[in-house]
Image: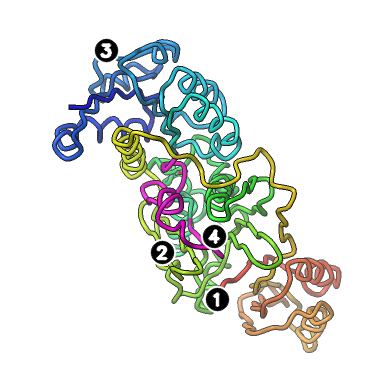
Amino acid sequence: MKKVGVAILGLGVVGGGTYKILTEHKEFYKKNHGVEITVESVLETNRQRALELGVDESKICNNVAEICSNPEVDIVVEVIGGVEPAKSFVIAALNSGKSVVTSNKELFCKYSHEIEKIAKKNGVGLFYEATCVGGVPVIRTLLDSLQGNKITSMMGIINGTTNYILTKMSECGSPYGEVLKEAQKLGYAEADSTADVEGYDAAYKLSILSSLSFHTKIPYTEIYREGIKDINNADIVYGKQLGYVLKLLAIGKNGENGIEVRVHPTFIKSSHPLAGVNDSYNAVYITGDSVEDVMLYGRGAGAMPTGSAIVGDIIYCATHPTHNYSTFKNTEKADPATKFVKNFESAYYIRLSAEDKAGVLAKVTSLLSKYSISVSQVNQENCGTAGTAPIILITHITKENNVKKAVADINATGFAKVENYIRVVS
Ligand code: HSE
């Protein structure tokens, strides 16, 4: 029977889940895949944590050099997260002839051009299913199953923490800070939750997914990014009254005018398939020219779902004699020929507080029409502070820059103020 040795760098939430799956399913993999996978060593400074998981004391290492020089180790799993020391460890492992499986989206997003080159030079594998959307097999779907398509768009809920927060805010009216703490306790959030709530985590994942979808490097720095920190419970309630659900969406489009990539809070119609994706669940909705629409759905974060993606990569690596690499032009920067659409089109939800008197709404809509913004829905609430009323507008499709200019003009009037505006996908 083929024997494969694995080393796990980091036994945190995901590393712990990976260790459990590999040890508990060992016999199953032997029987069904004809491969005996053994965790030969772990890199973990918290020895107690490793011992509690059942790791034999002799297998706990303190430095990566020990792992790189261990001939029993074939595959190194990097689940440390962040750029350094993860990057140096991954490079050391690749240069020692080990294949690498990583869940590190920040590392892969920023340095895939560099580390993949090293993997190729050494003839070893580099696998990264777990970088995006936890247990949902989206990377291999893009690398293999959808290769026959020109992918025109992808839209996804690709961050479990923010989806959990928005779901709880919507269902229970709970305040943002309280729900964030719950998400951290459940192990969904990154060590520094800024990456989740400010949309960086989703932007790293969108960079990887859109590079694969559009066959060219989409650096995360080209992605328009807005997080959920400024979301107010009032917006969720008003949106719901109009038939919308609020989600942090990652959107990638490849159209005639170029590539459009953005991450921001978005209202979607409650009948849209993504509207029912709640809690830490994630989903990616992909449109290809032949396949039409495909939606992949599942747990986007957590020890066992992400561990599932890692173990899938380990088995793939252990059972395939040659390695495949990324199917996009893996350069450091975007190809100079790639055009990015920054002034994108969308419908908008605009929440204003305005003086509650005759003619105010007409003046607001006349400022919108100055920038060719047409209104499709208006709702006035009765609960404003003395003399003011919250007004909710939904616009028809317009350009981002027009909305920004109209918002600045409205705020300069003195009788109306835009409290928030959110893009809408119908
Ligand atoms: N913090 C990430 C999330 C973990 O919430 O989706 C999975 O990448």
> Magenta residues, as a range?
128-157
Please name the amino acid that badge 1 sits on: Ser
Distance from disc 3 to disc 4, alpha carbons, whole Å, reads: 44 Å
Question: If you read the primary sequence from the N terminus, does the residue marked by circle 3 or circle 4 appear first?
Answer: 3
Regarding mark 3 in the picture, which secondary structure is present there?
Answer: helix
Q: Residues within 10 Å of mark 3 (few under 14, many from 20)?
A: few
* Mark drawn on residue 129: none
Q: Position of residue 28 (x, y in %)?
A: 16, 37
Q: Is residue 340 above or below residue 287?
A: above
Distance from disc 2 to disc 3, alpha carbons, whole Å, reads: 44 Å
Residue placed under numbered mark 2 in the picture: 295
Distance from disc 4 to disc 2, alpha carbons, whole Å, reads: 14 Å
Check if residue 80 falls in the magenta segment.
no
Question: If you read the primary sequence from the N terminus, does the residue marked by circle 2 or circle 3 appear first?
Answer: 3
What residue occupies the far front of the structure in this picture? 322
Please name the amino acid that badge 4 sits on: Leu
Residue placed under numbered mark 4 in the picture: 249
Q: Locate residue 406 relative to residue 136 in the image: left or right.
A: right
At horizontal 28% and vertical 23% (from top left) the residue drawn is 39
Relative depth, front residue between 118 and 15:
118
- Nearest to the eye among marks 1 and 2: give it: 2
